[in-house]
């Protein structure tokens, strides 16, 4: 699975402004709403589902990265967005560091295989230090999208 298969190009955000976990989850979910990927009437329910998943354990996986995700009946296909926060967000990460790279993922409950493949792709790419460094330095959505395309084309070490 490639980023192009599930990342909404219109929802990618290079300049996240939120400073705490719930606010950044809302900001990224709003980006998916604004891109037409989710319905307005599902917005609060999706945010709550992501926050409920966070209660099980932070998806801040360390090294400045978080992958908030949920399965939700309000989507009929796997959809995601990517966000970069220059100042970082307190995400209660495993290593205690602020998060700068966020991949927010929502999938339909009846497609667990897609959900797992997307999470696997994200985690594999995020193990590449060069990829992460370039993403953190991205100055706009176009730069993020170019990096995702390069990752899809195996132009990084992973």
Image (tube, rainbow, N blue to C red):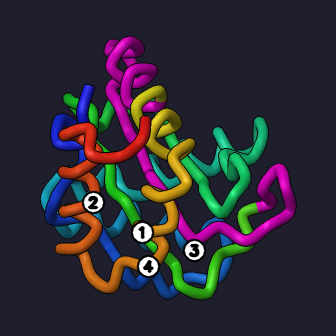
Of marks 3 and 2, the one in the foreground: 2
Q: Is residue 94 left or right of residue 30?
A: right
Instruction: Give percent across and percent down for residue 39.
Output: 22, 53
- Reading the image, the residue beneath label 3 is 23
Instruction: Report, in whole angstroms, how far the alpha carbon at label 1 lies from the one at label 2.
Output: 8 Å
Q: Is residue 99 magenta?
A: yes
Instruction: Report, in whole angstroms, how far the alpha carbon at label 4 lies from the one at label 1.
Output: 5 Å
Q: Earlier in the sequence, mark 1 or mark 2?
A: 1
The structure residue drawn at horizontal position 37% and vertical position 60%, both measured from the top left corner, is 82
Q: CB under 8 Å between callouts 4 and 1? A: yes
- Around disc 1, counting alpha carbons within 10 Å, would you say few (fewer than 14), some (14 to 19), or many (20 or more)? few
Name which quarter of the figure residue 112 lies in. top left
- Reading the image, the residue beneath label 2 is 147
Residue 134's disc is 1
Q: Earlier in the sequence, mark 3 or mark 4?
A: 3
Instruction: Give percent across and percent down for residue 12.
Output: 27, 66
- Reading the image, the residue beneath label 4 is 137
Q: CB under 8 Å between callouts 1 and 3? A: no
């Amino acid at each position: 699975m490639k980023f192009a298969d599930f990342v909404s190009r219109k929802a990618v955000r290079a300049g996240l402004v939120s400073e705490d976990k719930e606010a950044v989850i809302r900001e990224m979910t709003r980006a998916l709403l604004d891109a037409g990927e989710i319905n307005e009437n599902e917005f609060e329910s999706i945010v709550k589902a992501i926050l409920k998943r966070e209660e099980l354990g932070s998806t801040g996986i360390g090294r400045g990265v978080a992958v908030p995700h949920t399965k939700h009946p309000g989507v009929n296909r796997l959809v995601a967005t990517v966000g970069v926060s220059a100042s970082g967000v307190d995400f209660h990460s495993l290593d205690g560091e602020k998060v700068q790279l966020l991949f927010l993922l929502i999938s339909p409950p009846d497609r667990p295989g897609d959900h797992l493949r997307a999470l696997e792709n994200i985690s594999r790419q995020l193990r590449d230090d060069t990829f992460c460094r370039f993403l953190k330095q991205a100055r706009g959505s176009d730069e993020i999208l170019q990096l995702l395309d390069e990752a899809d084309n195996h132009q990084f070490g992973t």
